[in-house]
Image: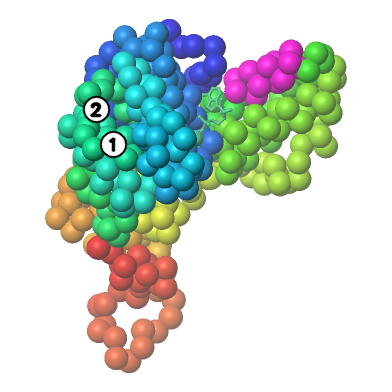
């Protein structure tokens, strides 16, 4: 059952809740990824709470918050005299979490030396306190790692160990940003307004439809954390009365932005997906295909994306494939997908978009690739 402190009704959040419930009782390591403030820690706690380890401790360490030189002794403990300030033996957080769960938050910030030590622990289950001459007893700790980084990209850049990545990535849960799950905004807001009003002993402000529309069309770069902070401010500002647009911070949006988004509900989603593929280098398969298959994206939105791709490439499907970061060998699969779901469109109209004469040196049939597409293709790996 969904706990009180885990709010969300969108299909994507319900799916993650289902996955947590399915894996909670296993020993599997879990990798939680997603932008900062999306709720990774909330899900980690939920997994622990549902597991057989729920009566043992759940300990969180923020790997970015502890200097690398201290992280080893924090995690593994130390023996007296092993360094200047080590006045007595001290157990580390892994030992403290024995039979329970440890959350290694911001694991992507962990340095190479610690990564190697963590890998050794994951392979043997044994820890060696700093300054000890032999390893201690094996521990039974479930490990959950969280990060807002693309760890796979970090392995390619050699800043994260590939073997450690595979060890951690047994179950991978991706928590989507708030802007991709609009349905959650209203229930979350209500939850935080109620929580803050109770804590501050104030009358809860009233949510108006107009304010909700504004908030639902905002991009929430700080995700749920940002929304929680706003709710806390609104409790002071609007206690006992309705929240008006004037009460909202300026960055939430101007009326025309909101009107345009309301009149064209998938317009923003389309732009975001397009940017994620062309600027963020995400593949069509994860940015579009997956949400479409899970009914989080409409056929109209997919069509709009393909249309935009064809406009950008002047009607070339092979270039759209590159633009959308689809591997060359998936070209046929992509075309089959478009035909099957009625998202394929004839290219003639887009070819006519070529309104200027190609340079003399260009081949007559070479499509003219605009700068953004050229970038996407040039930097494809
Ligand atoms: N689904 C949710 N329901 C209720 N509160 C949430 C939810 N997601 C996030 N929060 C709250 O938002 C804040 C940020 O969440 P957190 O788990 O720390 O994010 P992350 O670890 O991804 O940076 C916390 O105060 C958390 O309690
Ligand atoms: Mg966090």
Residue where numbered disc 2 is placed? 136
Q: Is mark 2 within 8 Å of ligand 2?
A: no
Viewed as shown, does residue 93 lie left or right of 210? left
Q: Specify whether residue 17 is in view.
A: no
Q: Nearer the viewer, residue 52 or 331?
A: 52
Query: Which region of the structure is painted magenta?
Result: 187-199
As helix, strand or loop, the secondary structure at mark 1 comes to: loop
Residue 69 lies, in percent from the top left, at 42, 49
Viewed as shown, does residue 242 lie left or right of 231? right
Q: Which mark is residue 69?
A: none
Viewed as shown, does residue 302 lie left or right of 215? left
Determine the image quadrant of residue 361. Answer: bottom left
Residue 21 lies, in percent from the top left, at 33, 15
The answer to the question of whether label 2 and label 1 lie on touching residues, with beta carbons closer than 8 A, is yes
Q: Nearer the viewer, residue 236 or 249?
A: 236
Q: Is residue 366 above or below residue 305?
A: below
Query: Split into 4 quadrants, where in the image is the C terminus?
Result: bottom left
x 64%, y 32%: residue: 227
x 42%, y 20%: residue: 58
Determine the image quadrant of residue 96. Answer: top left
Residue 316 lies, in percent from the top left, at 29, 64
Q: Is residue 191 magenta?
A: yes
* Residue with the most extreme bottom position: 360
Determine the image quadrant of residue 216. Answer: top right
């Amino acid at each position: 059952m969904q706990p009180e402190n885990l709010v969300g009704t969108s299909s994507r959040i319900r799916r993650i809740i289902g996955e947590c419930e399915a894996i909670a009782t296993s020993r599997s390591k879990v990798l939680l990824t997603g932008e900062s403030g999306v709720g990774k820690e909330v899900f980690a706690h939920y997994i622990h709470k549902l597991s057989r380890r729920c009566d043992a401790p759940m300990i969180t360490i923020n790997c970015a918050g502890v200097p690398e030189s201290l992280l080893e002794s924090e995690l593994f403990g130390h023996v007296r005299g092993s360094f200047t300030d080590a006045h007595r033996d001290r157990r580390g957080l892994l030992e403290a979490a024995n039979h329970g769960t440890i959350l290694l938050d911001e694991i992507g910030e962990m340095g190479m030396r610690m990564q190697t030590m963590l890998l050794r622990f994951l392979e043997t289950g044994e820890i060696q306190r700093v300054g000890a001459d032999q390893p201690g007893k094996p521990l039974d700790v479930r490990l959950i790692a969280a990060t807002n980084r693309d760890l796979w990209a970090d392995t390619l850049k050699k800043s994260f160990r590939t073997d450690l990545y595979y060890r951690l990535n047994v179950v991978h849960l991706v928590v989507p940003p708030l802007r991709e799950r609009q349905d959650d905004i209203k229930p979350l807001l209500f939850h935080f307004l109620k929580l803050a009003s109770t804590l501050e002993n104030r009358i809860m402000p009233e949510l108006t439809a107009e304010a909700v529309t504004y908030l639902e069309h905002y991009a929430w770069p700080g995700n749920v954390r940002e929304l929680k902070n706003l709710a806390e401010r609104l409790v002071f500002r609007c206690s006992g009365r309705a929240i008006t647009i004037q009460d909202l911070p300026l960055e939430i949006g101007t009326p025309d932005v909101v009107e345009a988004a309301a009149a064209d509900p998938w317009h923003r989603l389309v732009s975001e997906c397009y940017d994620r593929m062309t600027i963020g280098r995400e593949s069509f398969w994860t940015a579009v295909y997956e949400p479409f298959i899970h009914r989080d994206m409409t056929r109209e939105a997919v069509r709009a994306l393909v249309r935009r791709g064809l406009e950008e490439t002047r009607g070339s499907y092979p270039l759209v494939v590159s633009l959308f970061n689809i591997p060359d060998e998936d070209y046929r699969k992509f075309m089959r997908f478009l035909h099957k779901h009625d998202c394929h469109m004839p290219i003639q109209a887009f070819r006519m978009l070529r309104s200027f004469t190609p340079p003399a040196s260009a081949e007559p049939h070479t499509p003219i690739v605009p700068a953004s597409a050229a970038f996407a293709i040039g930097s494809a790996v």
